[in-house]
Image: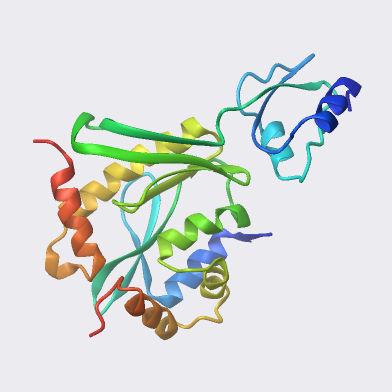
Amino acid sequence: MGSQALDYALQRQTRGTFVVRGGEKNYTEHSPLARCNVRSEFLVLTDEHALVVERSPWTMKTEFLNNLPLERGRVELSWPLKIETALSGDYFITSNDDLDVRSYGNTPEESRQNFCEIFEEMLDLYNNSKDEELSGDAIRLKALFDKIIKS
Amino acid sequence: MSISIDTIKESLRKKGFVETEGGKHNKWFFYHNGKRTSAHIVFSRTPKMKNFDDSLLNFAKSELKLKTNGDVKDLWNCPMSREQYVEKLISYGVIDGE
């Protein structure tokens, strides 16, 4: 373990996600190494070349989206969709509770991409369902999905 | 702690969850009285992911419409029967009690 990194780890708050940069390796984004460290109570670097250089802002991010990039193209939404991306252990979870759509991924970008894909799959699923095929809260969700895309 | 996704799927199948065909992501919905409910879980397309990590229990809890992580584990590991799960969904207002 690099002594500089150890000094950094012991002197500073080390919980959360970190962006790390190594001597021989260059971690330019959230690396498996960085997320592996998050699992511990305190930072333990397992790569002797790694140095913690920056605390990531990716603890939690909330966005309001007016449109979404789907496979069918970018669609305008009837109301701003609040989505949250949060770190949970080793994964990033992106969610919208109103529409009951959630995804996870190894990086915020992967989670966000999965969210858009799952949103579209849920949209198609509910749009192609009849009320009589659904039970309870699923009927409410169908009503929302029927309106969410601006025509 | 983690549990194999294949084990989870087998358990869900026994409890009345049905895999939805199509799409890039693996979606399982709970059916009650022949109707699809909002209780579901999506296994995101994540390369090389074969196990479901404990850090995703909160994710699973929301998807499956349960209140505690312990309930999620009980559903997966079998102590919670299909009937007990239905009772919970009815009491939480997720499905109609018919």
Q: Is residue B22 above or below residue A32?
A: below
In this view, the residue in front, B23 or A40, is A40
Left or right placement of residue A80 versus residue A31 in this view: left
Left or right placement of residue A112 versus residue A82 in this view: right
Q: Is residue A89 above or below residue B40?
A: above
* Image quadrant containing the C terminus of chain B: bottom left
- Which residue is pictured at 38% across the width and 75% down the height? B16
Tell me where residue A26 appears, x and y as whole percent: 70, 16
In this view, the residue in front, B66 or A124, is B66
- Which residue is pictured at 50% across the width and 72% down the height? B11
* Image quadrant containing the N terminus of chain B: bottom right
Color scheme of the displayed model: rainbow
Q: Residue furthest top?
A: A23
Left or right placement of residue A39 versus residue A101 in this view: right
Q: Quadrant of residue A29?
A: top right
Q: Quadrant of residue A73?
A: top left
In this view, the residue in front, B2 or A87, is A87
- Can residue B33 be seen here? yes
- Which residue is pictured at 82% across the width and 25% down the height? A8
